[in-house]
Amino acid sequence: MGQIKKLAGETVLYGLGSILPRFLNFLLIGVHTSVFNLAEYGIITKLFAYVAVVNVVFIFGMETAYFRYANRKEFDEQRVYNVAQTVVMGISLLLSIVFLFMTQPLSEFLLVKGHNRLIVYVILIMFIDASVAIPFARLRYQKKPKLFAYGKLVNIIIFIGLNIYLLLYSPWEASVEFVILANLIANAFFLLFFSKSLLSWRPTIDKQLTPEMVSYSYPVMLTGLIGISNEMFSRVTLEYWLPANFYQGKSNASALGVFSAAYKFAILMNLAIQAFRYAAEPFFFSNASDKKSPKLFATVNHYFVIVCCLLLLGVSTNLEFLTILLRKKEFHEGLFIVPILLLAYLFAGLYYNFSVWFKLTNKTYYGTIITIGGFIVTLVGNYLLIPVLGYYGSAIAALLCYALMALACFSLGQKYYPIPYEVRTDLTYIVLTCAAVYGINLVQIENSYLSIAFRFAMVFAFIGIVYLIERPRFRKVVA
């Protein structure tokens, strides 16, 4: 079980490189909600939602393909790297040029008409993100989480510093454009950070390797595209499908701002899952040939569930404390959906763990089929529930989507690549955590300090109980 201890250590380091920067970025919610109104905050969220979707196309699933083929003995890692980078750069450069010629219609489509410069900034951000995606993947393959973390931390420090200066201390009036410009300047640092790697890259088209990697990565890209669309879809459609004056006195754009602020807290779960994925993806591929890997993967998933349950409990029972980050009270009213979104992300993490079977068996097209099903659930769920329940309905749709995707992926995986997951135990932890969240939140204490102390005490008590249950096996893992 030494592999699990190593995986946990690498996850912590990748957490410094992914969770900490994103968490620091998350803290900017205090700055943004103090200078922007609900509608302006909604614009920022909407733009970054589209960036996340298009980035998936730019990268084209090549990160996963790189890990898959770099770990195969018959292929040279340097050649795999060159092929992966060539595909990503070719696709991202072509699409970026097309988008630059479409800035006017894009600004109208994104409801930011007259802000063509904003669209140019966004396109450049996406191109830089794609350019450094494979170099970052290579750091993970080479087991260099410290260097990975350093790059991410410097980037976010630049981004935060520019946000604080431009929005709070510069002589110019605060503008949404400043947030996007700060992101672009911060991302430009990556070009310097990876200058040696980028200059050493040689464009390569291999008659055997290129078609194989593209064939492998294409379904991964579609899976990622549909997956990120699942995540971003509600934030894009809420403004259109919400009936006028559903929230009395608020425009639909303002409702999107409230929903986006609530989503920020739920992203805390996603950050933890992302840190785990950075370490787990090369881990799964490098251990695939081990006969004991199915049992190892099941154990990894078990501890993953425990950590996510603790995070679900900690955030969901301390929303009162976290509201200090939302400087304007009108942002507070959507926080009741946070536990549902956190649970949805937990199931999204389970889906990622279960998906290892089709990545190792080269049946990546199953991921596309499952995520298409998930997208249909998201589409229908949002269409039916938003007009009736508002953003609460959107949160329910997200939970249904990821829970059904996890169930489908698990069921198919047990047929093609059986892994002895501890289903009963893991589900028990999830159910008990949800019950604890509900029970603790029922207790209302008027004194805010006592209320926070009570909730923290309940979380630590829960941690203590879990430790007592898991202690015998945990000792073997860390030994």
Image (spheres, rainbow, N blue to C red):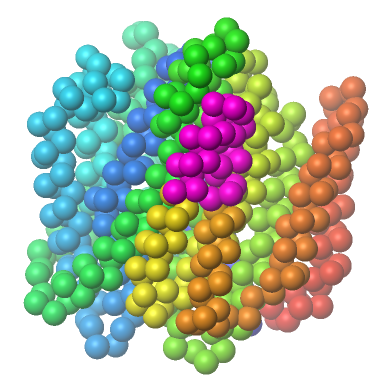
Residue 94 vs 107, above or below: the answer is below
- The image quadrant that residue 365 belongs to is bottom left
In magenta, the rendered stretch is 376-401
Q: Main secondary structure of the magenta part?
A: helix
- Residue found at x 44% / y 68%: 281
Percent coordinates x, y for residue 362 in the rendering: 35, 77
- Residue found at x 75% / y 69%: 425
Can residue 79 be spotted in the picture? no
- Residue found at x 63% / y 81%: 420
- The image quadrant that residue 337 belongs to is top right
Image quadrant in which the N terminus is located: bottom right
- Residue found at x 53% / y 35%: 384
Taking the image as shown, residue 220 lies to the left or right of residue 398, namely: left
Percent coordinates x, y for residue 285 in the rendering: 42, 77
* Residue closer to the observer: 247 or 143: 247
Residue 301 vs 464, above or below: the answer is below
